[in-house]
Image: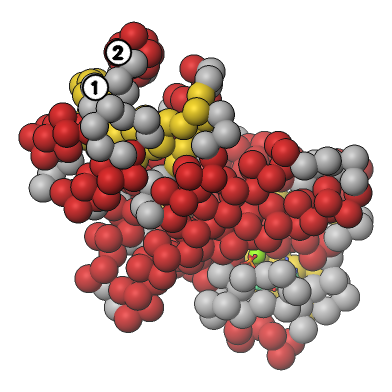
Amino acid sequence: MELDKEKILVVDDNLELAEMIGQLLGRHGFRVSIAPDGRTAVEKVLSESPGLVLLDLNLPDISGGEVLKKIKETNNETAVIILTAYGGEQVAVDLMKAGAEDFISKPFNNELLINSVKEVFKIRESQMEDKKYARLSSFEKFFPFLAHEIRNPLHAISGALAIIQRRSNLQDEVQAKSIRIIQEEVQHLTGFVQECLDFIRPPVRSRFVQVDANEVISAVINVISHIFADLTKKIKIREELQPKLPKVLVNYEEIKQAFLNIVKNSIEAMGEKGELIIKTRFKAEPSPGWVEVIFVDNGPGIKKENLPFLFHPFFTTKLRGTGLGLAICRRIIAERHDGKIHIESEEGKGTIITVELPKTQASEVAGEHSR
Ligand SMILES: Nc1ncnc2c1ncn2[C@@H]1O[C@H](COP(=O)(O)OP(=O)(O)OP(=O)(O)O)[C@@H](O)[C@H]1O
Ligand SMILES: [Mg+2]
């Protein structure tokens, strides 16, 4: 059954609260329907196919857990956020194991509710996308399903950890450190799953727009300064950008991702100190002309014997590396943008990575990317 993605069903016998939630969601562009009890909720899930259900656990007729089960039986793709009274978190965590996407303790503030709703929709959307990939090659076919299986418990772990964090004594250093370790590991695994999904994601031609590569570089440097907080103390990034570069027709987010992976590698390689120079220039030959982006770092360089493997998926020399960064770059640049990526490196001297993207031809001119 096709879901009505903008529709949210609020299930609560406290009609005043349900109305209030409805108005709040309405202000954020969602259409809302209300059910005062479990039976009506199940009927409405069947007749209205809402994308999301906000489900209060204390209903006058059927138990919240039973309603959740029925909703998932009716349409497994309908997302459910549990609304629970303070102290009911344990039940809520159990329900997340049974398929609910998230839970919110009452009383909650509006921002928390909206953030949770948006997050759940975002996850749902990427899960739907995952499903579309199922027709692809064996790794690509298999991984999205694995991703579901990894993401769901990760989500439950995060939820349970948030409870532990709220209730435990964070003055106790051992406890605080243990919580931090779990958080970091969950984040690492979430990042890994995302990287694998990025790697297998099929190209979206409709998102190709005219882009100025200089702008992408600025955006990447901006993102990098957030990822590596004390970056400026350690590493200098110098831009040598050619003004008035011809535009390239690209998927902006993908190209940004590729450049980000390259810059991250340089910074990770340089570690304590170094300089990264990012140059852009236009090369007129061979036709139609190419926009070149060159990344030059004075890090430790790459061992000769490793050079043939850099673009292989899962090749890494880092303790915590996934080894997908450059494989993703090649897929994006060479396979999806008819571009080229080339690495030169000498141990002890540094690394030069050159990306070439074909200049947009007149026949391709369509949308413009604006920031
Ligand atoms: N600028 C660089 N300087 C030195 N070594 C590099 C540089 N860029 C890449 N490498 C080497 O190439 C390997 C593969 O890079 P890639 O980005 O694919 O994976 P990763 O950085 O190890 O892990 P991930 O990017 O998935 O977190 C790295 O482990 C590193 O050994
Ligand atoms: Mg990398």
Q: Is residue 305 above or below residue 311?
A: below
Residue bearing the label numbered 1:
36
| Label 1 crowd bin: few (<14), some (14–19), many (20+), radius 10 Å | some
SS for tag 1? loop
Percent position of residue 54, x then y: 34, 31
| Label 2 crowd bin: few (<14), some (14–19), many (20+), radius 10 Å | some
CA–CA distance in space, label 1 to label 2: 7 Å
Judge by depth and name the residue closer to the eye, 77 or 84: 84
Left or right, 184 with respect to 283, comes to right
Judge by depth and name the residue closer to the eye, 10 or 236: 10
Residue at 57% x, 78% y is: 314
Percent position of residue 173, x then y: 91, 49
Contact flag, marks 1 and 2 (Cβ < 8 Å): yes
Q: Quadrant of ligand 1?
A: bottom right
Q: Which of marks 2 and 1 precedes in the sequence?
A: 2
Judge by depth and name the residue closer to the eye, 116 or 58: 58
Residue bearing the label numbered 2:
15
